[in-house]
Amino acid sequence: MHTRVKICGITSVLDAQHALAYSADAIGIVFYERSVRAISDLGLAREIALSVGPFVNVVGLFVDPQPDYVESVLGRVPLDCLQFHGNEDRVFCESFERPYIKAIRMKPDIDVSCSISNFQSANGVLLDTYVKGMPGGTGETFDWERVPLQDTPIVLAGGLTPENVAQAVRRVRPYGVDVSGGVEAEPGRKDPDKIAAFVAKAKSEPYL
């Protein structure tokens, strides 16, 4: 069994097809207006989601959204999982009755194990680099030694690239890895060669 790979920040059907072609397990569509990778056109988001077929998970990323906005997205876009990157609590995350991933930003003073335990209903917890004022997409790594052993599936994010993802998987043994900027030609546009290299390197190390 190998580490799963999610290519996040997909903004076009072409980039979704690149992720599919190189055996990514999931794609992420960003519904956060302040992101350079945000998609406001729900028709386009739906087209992207449908383009990968039934066996690639489609994840919708939100940051402190209004509930009615999430519901409007769910009404148009076939999402398999919700990913919350803000200050959402467990009750909010559970309220949509969908599988969800909760992102935890690795602040220097955070009790990581305690934070994870607050979201026992999550399908997984994503650990991302903390940069003040940025809910994600920092392009920076954090100290992987801070990742605790957990029963909850851990998704590792933050500054991953084709050059460092194999090392990250060896060190952390995460359930999955999440990448956006590390496989881009420019913000919002993926580089197929980088996607291919990233997926191959991530899956070269077994998930234990």
Image: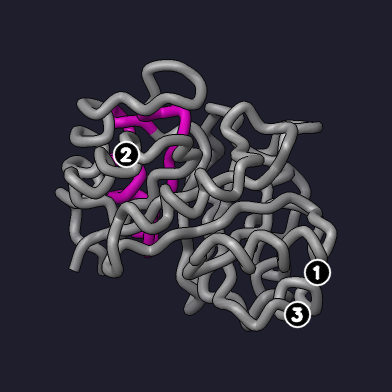
Instruction: Give amino acid for label 1.
Output: Asp
Q: Residue sitting at 20 percent across and 33 percent down?
A: 197
Q: How many marks?
A: 3
- Alpha carbon distance from label 2 to label 1: 30 Å
- Point out the image quarter for the C terminus: bottom left
Secondary structure under the numbered disc 3 in the rendered image: loop
Disc 3 to disc 1: CB gap under 8 Å: no
Q: Nearer the viewer, mark 3 or mark 1?
A: 3
Instruction: Give amino acid for label 2.
Output: Val
Q: Nearer the viewer, mark 2 or mark 1?
A: 1
Mark identifier at residue 165: 2
Question: Mark 2 packing: few (<14 Cα in 10 Å), some, or many (20+)?
Answer: many
Disc 2 to disc 1: CB gap under 8 Å: no
Q: Residue sitting at 54 percent across and 61 percent down?
A: 77
- 99 displayed left or right of 174: right
Relative to the observer, which residue lies in front, 82 or 128?
82
- Eyeballing the image, is 115 above or below 137? below
Q: Is residue 145 visible?
A: no
| Image coords of residue 133 (percent x, y) | 80, 32
Q: Is residue 184 magenta?
A: no
- 90 displayed left or right of 151: right
The region drawn magenta spans 161-183
Q: Residue sitting at 48 percent across and 79 percent down?
A: 151
Secondary structure under the numbered disc 1 in the rendered image: loop
> According to the image, label 1 marks what residue?
89
* Residue 172, picture quadrant: bottom left
> According to the image, label 3 marks what residue?
95
